[in-house]
């Protein structure tokens, strides 16, 4: 069973559903980067599945930056849908509950709203991969 909370966070009793995605590089408006899975491969949500992110550990490069995470159609591609936008008032790592549902066949990708402001590498999304077939 999986419970997804509207304002962020996930509870589940089947740990085989757990998925941890990490950002392997700095990413920004002109150099988007696809998140990697636990095996170090570019993560594409499998057919007939969704990926639900419930927690996030992140940092944007400098104070007052705005980073975006969303879906793209290709590896390291331009976002076709933005699901998470996070600003930062301190240049420190932050941990928060989030709520984002990524569709089947899409790549989970990081970007920003400005070419100079980037999401730091090692930003992590914690969530579950759910078969919806």
Image (spheres, rainbow, N blue to C red):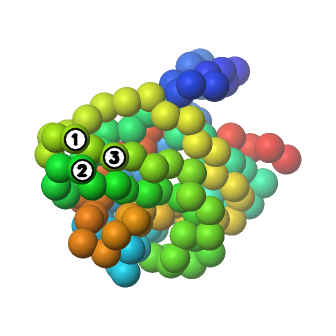
First along the sequence among labels 2 and 3: 2
Query: Do the residues bearing badges 1 and 3 touch, measured as CB atoms within 8 Å?
Result: yes
Is residue 19 found left or right of 67 in the rendered image?
Answer: right
Mark 1 to mark 2: distance in Å?
Answer: 5 Å
The N terminus lies in quadrant:
top right
Mark 1 to mark 3: distance in Å?
Answer: 7 Å
Are there few (<14), some (14-19), or many (20+) residues within 10 Å of tag 3?
some
State the image quarter where residue 129 is shown. top right
Query: Do the residues bearing badges 2 and 3 touch, measured as CB atoms within 8 Å?
Result: yes
Front one among 129 and 117: 117
Q: Residue at x 40, y 65 (%)?
A: 113
Q: Give the answer, above or below, for where 102 lies relative to 10.
A: below
**Secondary structure at numbered mark 3:** strand
Identify the residue position indicated by label 2 in the image.
Answer: 64
Query: Do the residues bearing badges 1 and 2 touch, measured as CB atoms within 8 Å?
Result: yes
**Secondary structure at numbered mark 2:** loop
Identify the residue position indicated by label 3 in the image.
Answer: 87
Are there few (<14), some (14-19), or many (20+) residues within 10 Å of tag 1?
few
Is residue 6 found left or right of 59 in the rendered image?
Answer: right
Identify the residue position indicated by label 1 in the image.
Answer: 89
């Amino acid at each position: 069973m999986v419970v997804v909370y509207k304002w962020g966070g996930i509870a589940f009793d089947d740990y085989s559903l757990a998925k941890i995605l990490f950002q392997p590089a700095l990413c920004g408006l002109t150099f988007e980067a696809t998140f990697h899975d636990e095996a170090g491969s570019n993560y594409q949500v499998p057919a007939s599945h969704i990926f639900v992110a419930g927690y996030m550990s992140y940092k944007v490069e400098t104070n007052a930056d705005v980073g975006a995470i969303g879906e793209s159609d290709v590896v390291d591609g331009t976002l076709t849908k933005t699901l998470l936008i996070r600003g930062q008032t301190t240049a420190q790592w932050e941990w928060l509950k989030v709520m984002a549902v990524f569709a089947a066949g899409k790549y989970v990708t990081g970007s920003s709203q400005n070419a100079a402001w980037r999401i730091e590498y090692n930003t992590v999304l914690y969530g579950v991969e759910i078969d919806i077939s």
